Image (spheres, rainbow, N blue to C red):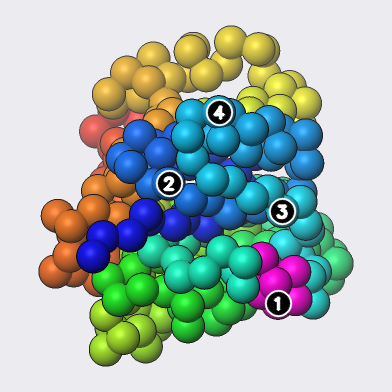
Amino acid sequence: MTHPKTAIVTGAAQGIGEAAVLRLKQDGVKRFLLIDWQSEPLDALAAKLESDGAEAQSLSIDLRDIDTVTSQIGAAIQKLGAVDILVNAAGTTERGGLADTTPDAFDRIFALNVRAPFFLMQTVAPVMRRGGVIVNICSMLAYGGPPFLLAYSSSKAALAGLTKGAANTLKRDGLHVFGINLGWTWTPAEQEVQTKVHGLPEDWADTLGAKQPFGRLLMPQDPAALISFLASSDAAMMTGAIIDLDQYVAGTVDDNPGA
């Protein structure tokens, strides 16, 4: 007997999370729990899904509040029933290097990028159907990043380790866990950071994207397509893979450093 597929997606209000939701809906997923701290765009996405024939709950919470994660998400899952897909797309790229990261900033970064995925997996895995898929959005900076993103890159390295460990833990339960090491991707949040924090012009993504090996930055639809594959039967015989979704090759030197 077939059942409608159910997906939980964090960071669903915009960017990669929103793109993942829309792609999974296109793939036939019928039931969603959407999680983000931004309530208005989250509710708008839920309404769009409902108008397109899907069921959607929206949950506007701060994933850094661990009591909220375990209580409210647990309660929402009780209403949702069995789950097939969990996408941990919520995250922060808050700046912070070795000299200037405060303990509070460090805790904020790790709370959202590492602790929240850990306890989401702990909460969701027991109610996942056999064959269920978890995808964690990691980063190429897990291999090492610029000095001003040391705390962030460290959190993504931790998430990569967590992904491998969770895959090993859950494999005998028939669950699959993957990570996506994401390269430089345009999102609304990245647009705000580059223009407001780094002072780049509004068209920075086009200008800098044209200098990339494949002629553009990644867009949210790129990881959404990979999530679609990982959540499909085509990936049924793999788990624990952390895939570099990038146009550069980790551990190599660019042959055109002045580009």
Q: Which residue is mark 3?
A: 59
Query: Which residue is at a point 55% across and 28% down the rendered structure image?
Result: 51
The answer for how far apart the CA atoms under marks 2 and 1 are is: 24 Å
Q: Are marks 3 and 2 in contact (CB under 8 Å)?
A: no
Q: Nearer the viewer, mark 3 or mark 2?
A: 2
Q: Earlier in the sequence, mark 2 or mark 1?
A: 2
Q: Please rate how many residues cluster around mark 1, counting C-alpha atoms within 10 Å: few if below 14, some from 14 to 19, many from 20.
A: some
Q: Are marks 2 and 1 in contact (CB under 8 Å)?
A: no
Q: Which quadrant, please, contains the N terminus?
A: bottom left
Give the amino acid at mark 2.
Answer: Lys
Q: Indicate the position of residue 78 as horizontal and vertical percent values.
A: 61, 73
Q: Which quadrant, please, contains the C terminus?
A: top left
The answer for how far apart the CA atoms under marks 4 and 3 are is: 18 Å
Q: Is residue 120 visible?
A: yes
Q: Which residue is mark 4?
A: 51
Give the amino acid at mark 3.
Answer: Leu
Q: Quadrant of residue 98?
A: bottom right
The answer for how far apart the CA atoms under marks 4 and 2 are is: 12 Å
Q: Is residue 160 visible?
A: no
Q: Which residue is mark 2?
A: 30
